[in-house]
Structure formats: structure tokens, C-alpha cells
Amino acid sequence: MISDFQKKKLLHFFNLLDSQVNGYLQIDDFSEIAENIRMGLGYEPGGDKHKFLAEKSAHFFHQLLNSATHSHPQSISEQEWVDYLDNDIINGGNEEKLEEFTEFIIGFLFDMFDDNHDGYISTDEFVDMFVVYGIDIKYSAKSFLNLDVNRDDRLSRNELIHAFETFLLSDDPKQPGNWIFGNWE
Ligand SMILES: [Ca+2]
Ligand SMILES: [Ca+2]
């Protein structure tokens, strides 16, 4: 069982993925995100960049749909999301599955936000994530500093993987990794 603190973080994560705010993760949430990134970065509709974002985003959702138990054919509810992460990923007792899921989430963030494909999330790219997901921007600097362990002003894949694992597993509100998606409080 996850703690109330962990649950709070998982719901924060769910709420940001649920762009259309209807309590379900559905394909529209993910096409909207691809579209918002496209507009934010000024890419042409239907162009290669847009296609890349739209395909990666749709693929991400379909992978989630394949992994989580869900009662409606094309949606994952808030409770189903929490149950999936709690029972399968966090407390499933399968280290490999946890690693795979972490790679999957961080891979998705890189596909969406590592705009210059240098293998790092810069401060600007990190701010893009806040804007696109409607995360309160006033926490972006604090969050970035918490995640940038080696203080080189960019977030590596390892820094994000480490943070995301903390976000999922830790029951300590003081851990810096809790800040990967901004203010969870
Ligand atoms: Ca980058
Ligand atoms: Ca760094």
C-alpha cells in the first residue's frame, strides 16, 4: 500500500496528464499536449516535428492503456491510475518493472521536451514542460534546482530517472526528487 503522501504525488501526476480535466486519461489528452508543444515552439501543423510529437504522445498513451487495468475501453480513471502504480509498479515487488516504467516515463519526457535533442533538459525545456502541463510556473526554478544534483544547469537522463524514482517511492516530503513535476503540495 502506498502512503497518503505518495498518493498525493500520484494524483498530482495524474492531474497534469489529464489535460482535459475530466478525471480520465484519454487519447485527446495526449494529442492536445502534442499540439500545445507544437504551438509553443512554433512548429508547422502537420510538419515532421509535429508528426514526431503526435506519434510519440499517442504511443505513450497506448502503452499506458496496455499496461494498466481499465474498465472503460479507451480511458484510465484516476482510481485505476493509482491502483496500477501502487499494485504493479511501486509495490509489485518487481524491480525490473519499476525500472522499465521509469525509463518509459523519462523517455516520454525527453521525446516531448528535449527540443534540441542534446540528451539534456535545459532550464528552458523544463519551463516548457510546466507551461504545456499547466504546472504552476512559480515553482519551476525551485524544482529545477532540486533535480539538478551536479549543478551543471541541465537535467540529465540519470538525474530525472533518480528524481522520478524518488517521486514514486519516497515517503519523505523533504526529498528533492519529489519536485520533478513542480509543486505537489
Ligand atoms: Ca535539450
Ligand atoms: Ca545536471
Image: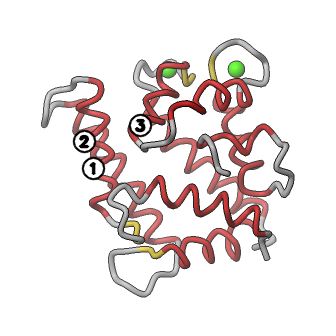
Q: Residue 106 falls in which quadrant of the image?
A: top right
The nearer-to-camera label among 3 and 1 is 1
> Which residue is pictured at 78% across the width and 57% down the height?
169
Q: Which residue is mark 1?
A: 32
Asked whether disc 2 touches disc 1, contact meaning CB atoms under 8 Å apart, the reply is yes
Q: Is residue 83 left or right of residue 67?
A: right
Q: Residue 154 falls in which quadrant of the image?
A: top right
Residue 81 percent location from the top left of the image: 55, 71
Q: Residues within 10 Å of mark 3 (few under 14, many from 20)?
A: many
Q: Gap between marks 3 and 1, in whole Å?
A: 12 Å
Q: Which residue is mark 3?
A: 112
Q: Is label 1's Cβ within 8 Å of ligand 1?
A: no
- Of labels 3 and 1, earlier in sequence is 1
Residue 178 percent location from the top left of the image: 73, 45
- Of labels 2 and 3, earlier in sequence is 2
Q: Which residue is mark 2?
A: 35
> In the rendered view, would you say 177 is above or below 8?
above
Q: Amino acid at mark 1?
A: Glu
User: Label 1's element?
Assistant: helix
Q: Say how many tags the image has.
A: 3
